[in-house]
Image (tube, rainbow, N blue to C red):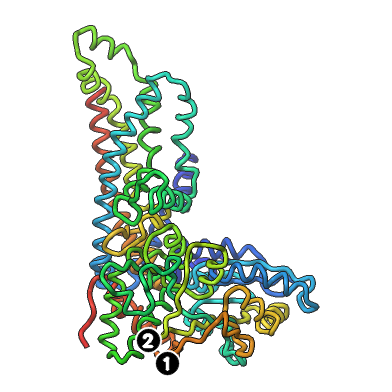
């Protein structure tokens, strides 16, 4: 890398981010038989099953992978700062759209039949086995004495899904937007921990802290299977989590990366996703016994889409949630 | 000359340049944005808590670190070598592992019946764990080199053991204790991993400044994160400089 490039990167991101990107930059780039996958943290276990399955197909024969997992926002920023990637998979669409204008991802990344999404899930309540506190709906979470755990909504993509699920559910119950804002304040007031990521939040909950953890269904299913002493409740009103994937076009598209994404979206790939706890994006593959459809399931698009929602709720310094978190309360109106 | 040049280059690349970049970044949005970033109620609460808990941790470290060093140097007991090598282990353990272990041990379902997880005490305990070696390791070599004939002379002149410790031993150890205290304070200010899971990072309660900064970075508020870091650095610099002056005065007084 020319010194000029280094200077440019350093001036954009914090030095530490630039340094990590440079270190990562020593790896391979596009082309060839190696596919660099950069993804958010939760699907790591799923990819451990999906990659060997892909390599066992004709299209995947002889293709090797480098894998990087981390917080969705971190991963997006790392790719932006120069980390080599052929396939990117994020929690939030806003982390993907960030990569469109610098030319890292094609503007038509969401043109496919699944609109760019590779997996679906829903926000659920993870509770202690047998649900001793009888937590079944959103109102139960703001009762006095109920200890809620969610990752910090300013740092975690997962927490943003939680917050928007809560907000949307309030609107669907007939509350006004400002009543829904007040609900968010009450909900965050009942939190006893706000770890920085979904993984940390789960770890905290499994250690015995808290009565209810807001999380992805795709995390709850494998944990319940693993034998942890938890159950989960799908609230009647909740949000459809949609996780975007794209092939990176910066430096030329790696055809093997496209083949991998095609596989992930194929019925074979989607079946494995389902086994790992994710709702398939092919409707015919969704088994209603495992993945019952909540009575009132809404999408982020119905709340304005991530770009608008990020600004309105999580923006600095005036986002609704930013203000609640920073102790500046809920603005009137 | 060559040595000085090498030193300047080394320090510039490793320390000065990154700090300068950080300081420059903190002003990306202008002075008013800087001010706004460092004066949010959440940020101030985190900073106050970080400072208070760091000071408490330093005080405990000074007392127990000195005691541990004393016992390790002056007492001969079976297993002394083992205890001595245990002291440095907190440095070797990844801090996030510290958090997981403490959470399992001193959280709900604690096998020893202590539950302090997600409380402010949890932050203190985690910080004590990761800063344990500083005072011990600064005091130990000085104590080993300490001329015992001074203590013997004091005793022969009729000084009680308490007086000997207060008037003879502690003054000689003071510079080492202060430098150990300074290191643990600086480390406590910036600690992240060990407090993360164990204390729960709840804003206004157990959120320390480093976690607040991390949340700002994750929320794409890089200049705000840099601004808060600059304030932390300034405080660390002030405290380190003050302790340095104090330590120099002490050594002059003793020698």
**Residue that badge 2 annotates:** A168
Q: Is residue A4 visible?
A: no
**Residue at mark 1 shares a chain with residue at mark 2:** yes
Indicate the quadrant containing the N terminus of chain A: top left, top right, bottom left or bottom right.
bottom right
Question: Camera-side residue: B246 or B6?
Answer: B246
Q: Residue at the location (25% across, 21% down)?
A: B165
Comes first in the chain, label 1 or label 2: 2
Q: CA distance from mark 1 to mark 2?
A: 9 Å
Residue B210: % across, % down: 36, 58
- Circles 1 and 2, Cβ within 8 Å, touching? The answer is yes
Residue A250: % across, % down: 61, 79
Q: Is residue A230 visible?
A: yes
Indicate the quadrant containing the C terminus of chain A: top left, top right, bottom left or bottom right.
bottom left
In the image, residue B251 sits, relative to residue B201, either above or below, namely above
Few, some or many residues within 10 Å of mark 1 (<14, 14–19, 20+): few
Q: Chain of mark 2?
A: A
Few, some or many residues within 10 Å of mark 2 (<14, 14–19, 20+): many
Q: SS for tag 1?
A: helix
In the image, residue B176 sits, relative to residue B118, either above or below, namely above
**Residue that badge 1 annotates:** A302
Question: Camera-side residue: B51 or A202?
Answer: A202
Q: Quadrant location of residue B209?
A: bottom left
Q: Residue at the location (66% across, 80% down)?
A: A271
Q: Chain of mark 1?
A: A
């Amino acid at each position: 890398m020319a010194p000029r490039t280094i200077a440019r990167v350093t001036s954009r991101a914090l030095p530490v981010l630039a340094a990590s990107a440079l270190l990562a930059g020593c790896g391979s780039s596009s082309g060839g038989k190696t596919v660099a996958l950069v993804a958010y943290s939760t699907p790591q276990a799923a990819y451990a099953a999906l990659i060997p399955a892909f390599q066992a197909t004709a299209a995947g024969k002889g293709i090797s992978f480098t894998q990087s997992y981390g917080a969705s926002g971190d991963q997006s920023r790392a790719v932006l700062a120069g980390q080599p990637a052929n396939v990117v998979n994020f929690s939030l669409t806003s982390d993907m759209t960030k990569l469109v204008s610098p030319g890292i991802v094609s503007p038509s990344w969401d043109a496919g039949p699944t609109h760019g999404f590779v997996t679906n899930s829903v926000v659920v309540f993870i509770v202690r086995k047998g649900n001793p506190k009888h937590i079944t709906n959103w109102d139960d979470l703001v009762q006095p004495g109920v200890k809620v755990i969610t990752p910090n909504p300013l740092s975690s993509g997962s927490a943003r899904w939680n917050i928007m699920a809560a907000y949307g559910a309030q609107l669907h119950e007939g509350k006004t937007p400002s009543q829904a804002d007040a609900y968010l304040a009450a909900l965050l007031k009942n939190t006893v921990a706000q770890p920085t990521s979904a993984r940390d939040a789960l770890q905290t909950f499994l250690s015995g802290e808290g009565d209810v953890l807001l999380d992805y269904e795709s995390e709850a299913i494998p944990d319940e299977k693993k034998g942890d002493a938890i159950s989960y409740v799908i609230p009647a009103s909740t949000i459809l989590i949609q996780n975007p994937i794209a092939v990176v076009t910066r430096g030329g598209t790696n055809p093997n990366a496209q083949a991998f994404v095609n596989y992930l979206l194929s019925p074979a790939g989607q079946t494995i996703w389902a086994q790992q706890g994710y709702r398939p994006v092919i409707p015919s593959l969704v088994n209603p016994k495992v993945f019952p459809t909540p009575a009132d399931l809404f999408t982020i698009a119905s709340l304005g889409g991530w770009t608008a929602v990020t600004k309105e709720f999580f923006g600095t310094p005036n986002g609704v949630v930013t203000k609640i978190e920073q102790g500046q309360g809920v603005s009137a109106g | 000359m060559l040595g000085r040049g090498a030193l300047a280059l080394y320090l510039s690349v490793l320390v000065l340049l990154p700090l300068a970049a950080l300081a420059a970044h903190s002003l990306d949005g202008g002075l008013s944005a800087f001010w706004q970033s460092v004066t949010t109620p959440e940020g101030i609460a985190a900073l106050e808590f970080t400072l208070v808990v760091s000071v408490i941790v330093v005080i405990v470290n000074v007392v127990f670190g000195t005691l541990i060093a004393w016992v390790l140097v002056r007492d001969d007991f079976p297993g002394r070598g083992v205890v001595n090598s245990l002291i440095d282990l907190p440095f070797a353990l990844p801090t996030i592992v510290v958090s997981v272990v403490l959470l399992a041990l001193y959280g709900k379902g604690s096998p020893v019946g202590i539950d302090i997880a997600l409380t402010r005490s949890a932050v203190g305990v985690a910080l004590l764990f990761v800063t344990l070696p500083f005072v011990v390791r600064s005091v130990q070599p000085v104590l080993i080199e300490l001329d015992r004939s001074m203590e013997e002379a004091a005793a022969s002149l009729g000084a009680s053991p308490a007086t000997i410790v207060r008037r003879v031993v502690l003054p000689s150890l003071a510079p080492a204790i202060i430098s150990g205290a300074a290191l643990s304070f600086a480390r406590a200010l910036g600690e992240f991993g060990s407090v993360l899971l164990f204390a729960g990072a709840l804003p206004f309660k157990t959120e320390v400044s480093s976690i607040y900064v991390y949340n700002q970075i994750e929320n794409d508020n890089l200049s705000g994160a840099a601004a808060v870091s600059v304030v932390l650095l300034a405080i660390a610099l002030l405290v380190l400089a003050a302790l340095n002056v104090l330590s120099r005065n002490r050594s002059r007084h003793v020698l």
